[in-house]
């Protein structure tokens, strides 16, 4: 299984304290990578660090950083390279989602979503990518969404779908520019995933009946779990995907196959 070998590789997961981000971080650590997670919330980072150690048996490090702030991203890249020696894998798993009907959508919230969901990823690719160019090697994986490809029937998603569509196109452009340096840039695009936060939303909207309605919309007839993203990320982070770049993988239960 050398194609999927990550032992000795150094990975930085932006948004690694979030539901899907933490699961990805745990998966990478279990697969042998040395993992560092980063976000703005040190309390969440400490919790994730403990939980990942309990579940994977691996020690990980964390860094407090604001991915929307260019100076903070530049410092994060410099500090992780200094501490880890090099960064082979960058996972951009940060993002926010605020649902407001288009006729009521405040422009400042729309701009905030663009800043967090799009600009922050560009900044991470800029600074970590510069390091990877020097090494002539790198794997960048971006967390997108099915909403980058298909619109939602649920009212209030104009900010989210817009930013995820932008992420997909930005990923392709970065892949086109970084390819000459043996850096691959790809994305995964899950559907609604039952993180702890999503479980709270489900319970507020009817519990099991709402969960069943969401699951019945998918060909696989079950809700997505955070760990459903791990395999795709390991593939895109490993030698198995060395000739694959500018692509979106859909661990979505088949949603995009039926629209």
Image (spheres, grey):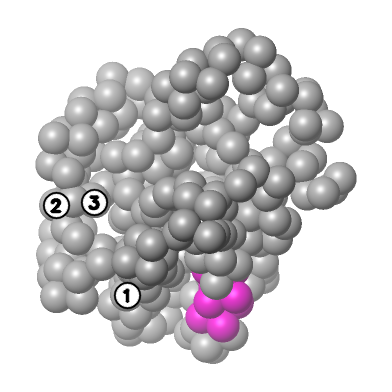
Q: Quadrant of residue 85?
A: bottom left
Which disc number belongs to residue 64?
A: 2
Seen in the picture, residue 182 relative to 84 is either above or below; the reply is: below
Q: Is residue 43 magenta?
A: no
Task: Identify which residue is drawn at 54% across, 21% down.
Answer: 205
- Visible in this render: residue 239? no
Task: Identify which residue is drawn at 20% across, 70% down.
Answer: 69
Seen in the picture, residue 48 relative to 75 is either above or below; the reply is: above
Seen in the picture, residue 133 relative to 15 is either above or below; the reply is: below
Q: Residues in magenta?
A: 167-174
Looking at the picture, tell me which residue is in the foreground, 84 or 149: 149
Seen in the picture, residue 204 relative to 138 is either above or below; the reply is: above
Per the model, the C-alpha gap separating discs 3 and 1 is: 14 Å
Looking at the picture, tell me which residue is in the foreground, 181 or 156: 156
Is 194 positioned to the left or the right of 21 in the image? right
- Visible in this render: residue 210? yes
Q: Quadrant of the N terminus?
A: top right
**To which residue does mark 3 refer?**
38
Q: Position of residue 107 (x, y in %)?
A: 38, 68
Q: Are marks 2 and 3 in contact (CB under 8 Å)?
A: yes
Per the model, the C-alpha gap separating discs 2 and 1 is: 16 Å
User: Within 10 angstroms of label 1, few (less than 14), some, or many (20 or more) residues?
Assistant: some
Which disc number belongs to residue 123?
A: 1
Secondary structure found at label 2: strand
């Amino acid at each position: 299984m050398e194609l999927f070998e990550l032992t000795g590789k150094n990975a930085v997961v932006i948004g690694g304290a979030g539901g899907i981000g933490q699961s990805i971080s745990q998966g990478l650590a279990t697969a042998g990578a040395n993992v560092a997670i980063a976000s703005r919330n040190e309390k969440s980072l400490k919790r994730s660090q403990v939980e990942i150690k309990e579940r994977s048996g691996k020690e990980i490090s964390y860094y407090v950083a604001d991915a929307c702030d260019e100076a903070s991203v530049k410092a994060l890249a410099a500090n992780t390279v200094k501490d880890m020696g090099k960064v082979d894998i960058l996972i951009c798993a940060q993002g926010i989602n605020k649902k407001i009907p288009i006729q009521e959508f405040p422009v400042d919230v729309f701009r905030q979503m663009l800043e967090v969901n799009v600009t922050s990823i560009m900044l991470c690719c800029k600074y970590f990518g510069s390091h990877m160019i020097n090494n002539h090697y790198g794997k960048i994986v971006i967390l997108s969404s099915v909403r980058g490809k298909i619109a939602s029937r649920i009212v209030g998603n104009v900010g989210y779908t817009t930013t995820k569509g932008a992420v997909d196109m930005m990923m392709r452009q970065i892949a086109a520019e970084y390819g000459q340096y043996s850096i691959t840039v790809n994305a995964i695009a899950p559907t609604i995933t039952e993180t702890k936060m999503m479980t709270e939303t489900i319970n507020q909207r009817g519990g099991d009946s709402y969960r069943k309605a969401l699951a019945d919309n998918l060909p696989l007839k079950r809700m997505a779990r955070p760990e459903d993203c791990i395999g795709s990320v390991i593939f895109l982070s490993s030698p198995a995907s060395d000739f694959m770049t500018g692509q979106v993988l859909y661990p979505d239960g088949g949603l995009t196959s039926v629209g």
